[in-house]
Image (tube, rainbow, N blue to C red):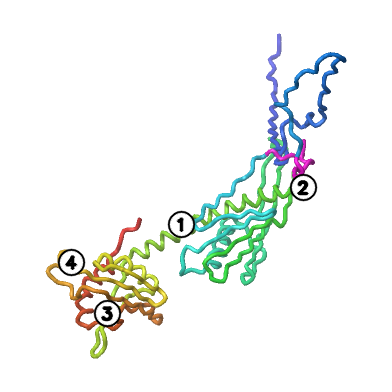
Amino acid sequence: MLKQVSPLILIAAVTACSTPIDRRQANDVDQQYQDLASAPKLVIPEGLNQPTYSKEYDIPEVGAKVDKTLVGSTLDIRPPLQVLPMAAGTRVEEGDDNIKIMVESIDNDSDLKQEIFDVLKEYFASESVQIRAEDYDAGTFETDWIESSEVVESSFWGSDKVYLLRQRYKYDVDIRPHGRSGNVTISLIEHEESYDGEQQEILLSGEDKRRYTIDILNDSISYMSIKRAQAMKAKRLKQSLGIDVDLISEQDEQAYWLADAKFKRTWDRLRIVLPEMGFEIVDMDSNKGLLYINVVDDSGFWSSLWGEKKLSLDEGSYRIELKDDSADDKTQIHLLGADNEPLESEVVIAVYEGFSELMEEDRKVR
């Protein structure tokens, strides 16, 4: 009688992957082409004609600028990384060992240097990376170690073999005196690689440093792109909201309008509202807070705006002067004649109703 035996089948699953170093090299690790020699020309007996040799497949001589040591396993076959300056107001300049980002301000009301510092530090905080050193006045900060690991070999019974990459970067922020533009230089300052706990001796070339720097750059700029898009949308939303305007008319004083907004926002709003009122803006001087306008009599337009009311302004040239009331974050709006003299209070009061309606109207955000 045969005894039934249930065989025990042991399944060992081991997955082996190439290391990051292996991926830099061609698959043929022997690189036999390095040892190949050019075949000599045919020896033609004396008295016979030499054959015609084609030069179509001749390999050209290596130029003087080519690094002749980059052959075989030392040749990096990876395609180059592309710089992607996706954030609004940014462009990129590449150096040998670093990447310089040219940054322009998208909001004259904000501090460009503070914006760059805040965005970059917020980005690293989102990646759980600490800032090791910071000098705001000098415009520099250094990251702590940025680590990325990859399981190269895994087994059901043994421990995984992990390839660990650790790097630190330095950012230099240089803002020009006018404050509207500057640049950020990113440099790789420390680099370590280990495999299964053993330190790897890696000599980084300039191309290696550019690859790593471009990689961290693209992540940084991608985050800046998101934050700038959010800031611009918030600004458009703020600008779309109406501005409350009060009529200030006191006895023995010239009447004027008082906008509940700072100078810049009031100025931008007037550039939208005045043409809608039928006032042609012919010139402007923001430093002096002056808008030069022309008024043309269009009874049809004014009747559609204020019903049967008629504009109390004669045809001609006028000026609108803005005065910053910084104590209350408000802006005074004065209506002047072509001679730069204030108009009668009755005229300012008469125009106020339609003017305030347009200034206080909320607009759709696109």
Give coordinates of residue 158: x percent, y percent: 73, 38
Q: Is residue 9 left or right of residue 351?
A: right
Local crowd at mark 2 within 10 Å, few (<14), some, or many (≥20)?
A: few
Residue type of the residue flagged with mark 4: Asp
Q: Callout 3: helix, strand or loop?
A: strand
Q: Earlier in the sequence, mark 2 or mark 4?
A: 2
Measure how far apart labels 2 and 1 are at the Cα level.
39 Å
Q: Which residues are magenta?
A: 63-77
Q: Earlier in the sequence, mark 2 or mark 3?
A: 2
Residue for point 25% across, 83% down: 255
Measure how far apart labels 3 and 1 are at the Cα level.
42 Å
Give coordinates of residue 186: x percent, y percent: 64, 58
Q: Main secondary structure of the magenta part?
A: loop
Which label number is shown at residue 229? 1
Q: How many marks?
A: 4
Residue type of the residue flagged with mark 1: Ala
Which label number is shown at residue 354? none
Measure how far apart labels 3 and 4 are at the Cα level.
19 Å
Q: Earlier in the sequence, mark 3 or mark 1?
A: 1
Determine whether label 2 and label 4 are within 8 Å by CB: no
Q: Is residue 327 left or right of residue 173?
A: left
* Callout in the foreground (2, 4): 4
Residue type of the residue flagged with mark 2: Ile
Q: Which residue is mark 4?
A: 298
Image quadrant assignment for residue 19: top right
Residue type of the residue flagged with mark 3: Gly
Residue for point 87% across, 15% down: 46
Q: Residue furthest front?
A: 47
Q: Which residue is mark 2?
A: 202
Q: Callout 4: helix, strand or loop?
A: loop
Q: Which residue is mark 3?
A: 337
